[in-house]
Amino acid sequence: MSLNWFPDMPAALAAEEALFESMPTETGARQWLMWQGQKSLVVPRTFLRRPGLQKAVARSRQAGWPVFMRQTGGDVVPQGPGTLNISLAWVEEGSRGSSIIQGYAAICDPIRTVLGGSCGSVASAFCDGAFNIVINGRKLAGTAQRRRRKGPHTLVLAHALILVDEDIEAGVAATNDFLCSLGQTPGLRADAHVNATEALCDYALTPARLANRLFVHLAQSDLAPGMAA
């Protein structure tokens, strides 16, 4: 397994989509993809309905933060070279499949085993949700989930964004500016977030090294079969 570097965010999002779309309809099938992408802001497609989106996108691009659309829901998230993304796709039997909570556990539990923390909401964090991974009250990772019925099976895609050694202040500032351009008053704070380097007091940690630690844990837990290269 290797950490995939994508020089542009559309290629990264396309790879994640291909992971989901190419899943064999075989109960228990599971594939992981670990990746990094360019400095950018990624927003859900629901933002296409926002008035003033084109001007906000242009302003963000001029500031060095191009904006791209993703399929999963949520809110604006900053990406960068200090961020590790993990995409997990799997197949369940039946049209209903597991619960949403079980789906988030599938992506959160391996990360929490390696990094620690708990799941919960963090006020003033970007794209806040109940299934953030939180350490000492600060957001270390955010998660999203997507489901689709395919015949007698349910396809599930879960995604986690882990702050490893990212420039959190710059990403939060860019996110605040973008949301303000859309008429919002977001009030996101950099200190609501934490890098894994700080949380673990391991300042030599990089996304590649963390990806390797996670892969070792997945292999030992028999969760690694189908790991995408």
Image (tube, helix red, strand yellow):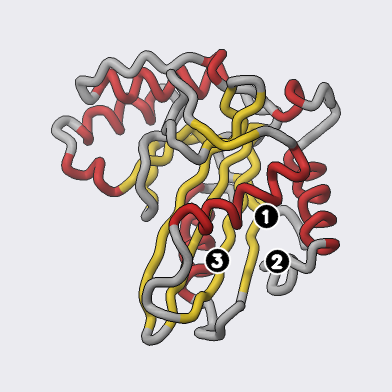
Q: Position of residue 24 (x, y in %)?
A: 54, 83
Looking at the rendered structure, the secondary structure element under dot 3 is strand
Q: Are marks 2 and 1 in contact (CB under 8 Å)?
A: yes
Residue 1, placed above or below residue 65 = below
Q: Quadrant of the N terminus?
A: bottom right
Residue 188, placed above or below residue 107 = above
Q: Position of residue 134 (x, y in %)?
A: 60, 30
Choose the circle earlier in sequence order: 3 or 2: 3
Q: Which residue is mark 3?
A: 89
Choose the circle earlier in sequence order: 3 or 1: 1
Looking at the rendered structure, the secondary structure element under dot 1 is strand
- For disc 1, the neighbor class at 10 Å (few under 14, some 14 to 19, many from 20) is some
Residue 4, numbered label? 1
Q: CA distance from mark 3 to mark 1?
A: 16 Å
Q: Tell me the kind of residue under disc 1.
A: Asn
Looking at the rendered structure, the secondary structure element under dot 2 is loop
> Residue placed at 25% from the left, 41% from the top?
47
Residue 229, numbered label? 2
Mark 3 or mark 2, whichever is nearer to me: 3
